Image (cartoon, rainbow, N blue to C red):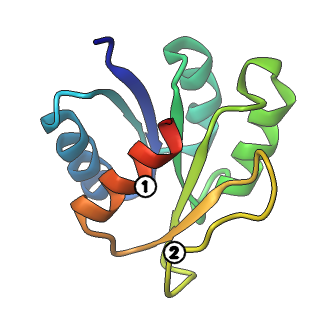
Amino acid sequence: MEKKRILIVDDEEAFGDIVKLNLEYTGEFEVLAEKRGSEALNAARHFRPDLIILDVLMPDMDGPAVLKELRKDKDFKNTPVIFLTALVSKNQSADGRNQPYVASKPISSDDLLEIVRRHLK
């Protein structure tokens, strides 16, 4: 079985590394972590992720701005996106197609893994 590719973009390097390690530990995923929103666009074009996990608040380019730029590229119009943020108190499903799922920080590894698997189906 081919591993699904996941791009994580979070300016908290330790958080991104923990998420990366937890996802890779399953053996199901190949994961690339980036710290800057502006780096996410180039990384996505080269890495070709099946799913993207974005922090909402980042200093150089926030998650919504990254998503807006990604959606301009036909290759990423339908790529599932999960926003991870401390701005919400519980996980929220998006209304409508191509809208990001919003998950609250902190999040357990098991909960994140379940959300990732659900969005990759």
Q: Earlier in the sequence, mark 1 or mark 2?
A: 2
Label 2, secondary structure: give it: loop
What residue is at 50 percent from the left and 87 percent from the top? 89
Callout 1 touching callout 2 (CB < 8 Å): yes
Give the position of the N terminus as an image quadrant. top left
**The quadrant where residue 40 appears:** top right
18 relative position to 76: left or right: left
Q: Position of residue 49 (x, y in %)?
A: 51, 24
Tell me how many marks there are.
2
Instruction: From the image, tell me which residue sits under label 1.
Output: 115
Tag 2: amino acid: Asn
Farthest residue, direction bottom: 89
Farthest residue, direction left: 25
Label 1, secondary structure: give it: helix
Question: How many residues crowd mark 2 within 10 Å: few (<14), some (14–19), many (20+)?
Answer: some
Q: Position of residue 118 (x, y in %)?
A: 46, 48
34 relative position to 37: left or right: left
What residue is at 31 percent from the left and 64 percent from the top? 111
What residue is at 61 percent from the left and 59 percent from the top? 101
Q: Position of residue 74 (x, y in %)?
A: 82, 20
- Which is more toward the observer, 83 or 78? 78
- Which is more toward the observer, 121 or 30? 121
What residue is at 76 percent from the left and 45 percent from the top? 98
Q: CA distance from mark 1 to mark 2?
A: 10 Å
**The quadrant where residue 27 appears:** top left
**The quadrant where residue 107 appears:** bottom left
Instruction: From the image, tell me which residue sits under label 2.
Output: 91
Classify 14 as above or below 67. below
